[in-house]
Image: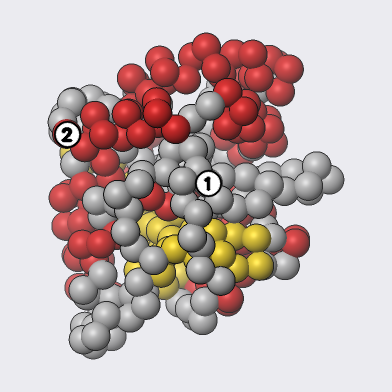
Amino acid sequence: MPLSQVLGAGRDRRFTLPQFLVDLPAESGGRTAFFDTGAPPRPQRGALPIVFVHGLAGNVTQWIHVAPALASRTRVLGLDLAGHGESAFAPRERPYSVAAYARQVAAFMDAVDVDRAILVGHSLGGMVASETAIHFPERVAHAVLVNPAGFSPVPRWLQSAGHLILRPRVLEPLLPRVWRWILRQVFQETNDRTREFIETCSDTYVLHDIIGIARVMHDLRHDFMERDLAEELSGSGVATSIVFGAEDKLVPPKRIRAVRDQVKFTVFDEIQRCGHMPNIEQPERVIRALHQVLDSSS
């Protein structure tokens, strides 16, 4: 089903790749918005499809500077996770979790006839890509993680504080007050792309949209604070690469450096003078890494 209305909160209006809706099983996310270029006229022989997964409070258009650059080489797709973008919210009795998002990715791949793909995830999407590789290794040829969460479990005292804060009755009045401050922490340097991203968020988010993310954050609190995916990912047998900003203020880069030998990344690209979203701040580095991954996967 074509998605004609793509003017939701945080959605970059300049994103031109074709967007659609698909009805997945309710337990796998329900109605899901996605983009799909289809295969290019002359795809590189053996080139695997690339599936993009955004971060917390994100949507498919946050790949605007990356996905189109790969479309001449292979099929590129991306989905809005449940509770994000134009995808459906999960019913209350079905809490959000990284494991549930991994099931949504696998069900989405079934729905669009993708047996095996290169999975690219940013932040929360990095956790989802890792979880998919761990539980559905036959579906993931390569996991490419962009400033992934889930590699740095927080100390127990901070976990206790987090469980108190990450509740809807605390988050709902708090998020509208601090979200602009959080936006300012995302990038290390200012350029046209970062300015456009902040303007899009500022112009399109309203109070209801910001509060809506409170439930997602509450449901994901255990995943965010307690998971350490490095060991599980290293045992999955799935090739893994990583691209991350060295000045990320939201996800500690030191933990990513610490697991370099444990995970044995195929591509390890630490970007200087870059914050939490290289896909916006320095997308050429993400594109370069994906070309390397495509070369190694062919």
| Side (left or right) of 166 relative to 150 | right
User: Looking at the image, which residue is at 37% across and 77% down?
Assistant: 38
Q: CA distance from mark 2 to mark 1?
A: 23 Å
Residue topped by disc 1: 85
- Quadrant placement of the C terminus: bottom left
Q: For the residue marked with disc 2, what is the amino acid?
A: Asp
Q: Secondary structure at mark 2?
A: helix
- Mark number, residue 192: 2
Q: For the residue marked with disc 1, what is the amino acid?
A: Gly
User: Looking at the image, which residue is at 68% across and 32% down?
Assistant: 215
Colour convention of the picture: secondary structure
Instruction: Say which quarter of the image contains residue 239.
Output: bottom left
User: Looking at the image, which residue is at 17% across and 49% down?
Assistant: 285
Q: Is residue 222 visible?
A: no
- Badge 1: few (under 14), some or many (20 or more) residues near its Cα, within 10 Å? many
Q: Is residue 179 visible?
A: yes
Residue 14 on image: x %, y %:
30, 49
Residue 176 on image: x %, y %:
55, 17
User: Looking at the image, which residue is at 16% across and 50% down?
Assistant: 284
Residue 118, above or below 274:
below
- Quadrant placement of the N terminus: bottom right
